[in-house]
Amino acid sequence: MKINGGCHCGAVRFEAEVGEPPIAALDCNCSVCRMTGFLHVMIPHRQFELQTGRDDLKSYRFGTGAAEHLFCRHCGVKSFYQPRSHPDAWSVNANCLDEVPELIVELFDGAHWEQAKANLDAQG
């Protein structure tokens, strides 16, 4: 199934291939996700295509600097980014999709990142 989305102003647009719904999503409570309302849908790099806006993206890093938070320089919306937890995938914000498919939302305790990542890895 193809999904499409992007930022608020439309400068950043992407398309991705996901499985059939329901789609797995992570609701993280780390400081940045909690403050921005980011709902994570992990998309392997090979299944994601940035259609427009490469030059409109700005980067923000904090903490370990491993995650690269990308946001539109015009409207400030982070529609996708490179997460620390999934280095081979983009994290797409389900709230930035044109049409949100049925989701199965799992909580991710990003406020206690190391243990939450270990729990995620143990699930396979």
Image: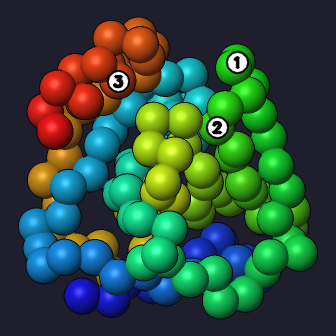
Q: Is residue 24 above or below residue 116?
A: below
Residue named by callout 2: 67
Q: Is residue 112 above or below residue 78?
A: above
Q: Earlier in the sequence, mark 1 or mark 3?
A: 1
| Dot 2 amino acid type | Ala
Q: How many angstroms separate mark 2 from mark 1 (CA)?
A: 9 Å
| Dot 1 amino acid type | Gly
- x and y percentages locating residue 118 in the rendered image: 29, 19
Q: Are marks 2 and 1 in contact (CB under 8 Å)?
A: yes
For residue 98, side relative to residue 68 (left or right): left
Residue named by callout 3: 117
Residue at the (68%, 59%) spot, across then down: 77
Q: How many angstroms separate mark 1 from mark 3 (CA)?
A: 15 Å
Mark 1 vs mark 3, foreground winner is 3
- x and y percentages locating residue 62 in the rendered image: 74, 25
Disc 3 crowd, CA 10 A, few/some/many (<14, 14-19, 20+) = some
Q: Is residue 46 above or below residue 59?
A: below
For residue 33, side relative to residue 69 (left or right): left
Q: Earlier in the sequence, mark 2 or mark 3?
A: 2
Disc 1 crowd, CA 10 A, few/some/many (<14, 14-19, 20+) = few
Report which quarter residue 100 is drawn in: bottom left
- Inspect this view and state whether residue 21 appears: yes
SS at mark 3? helix
SS at mark 1? loop
| Dot 3 amino acid type | Lys
* Residue 63 numbered tag: 1
Image quarter hosting the C terminus: top left
Q: Nearer the viewer, residue 20 or 66?
A: 66
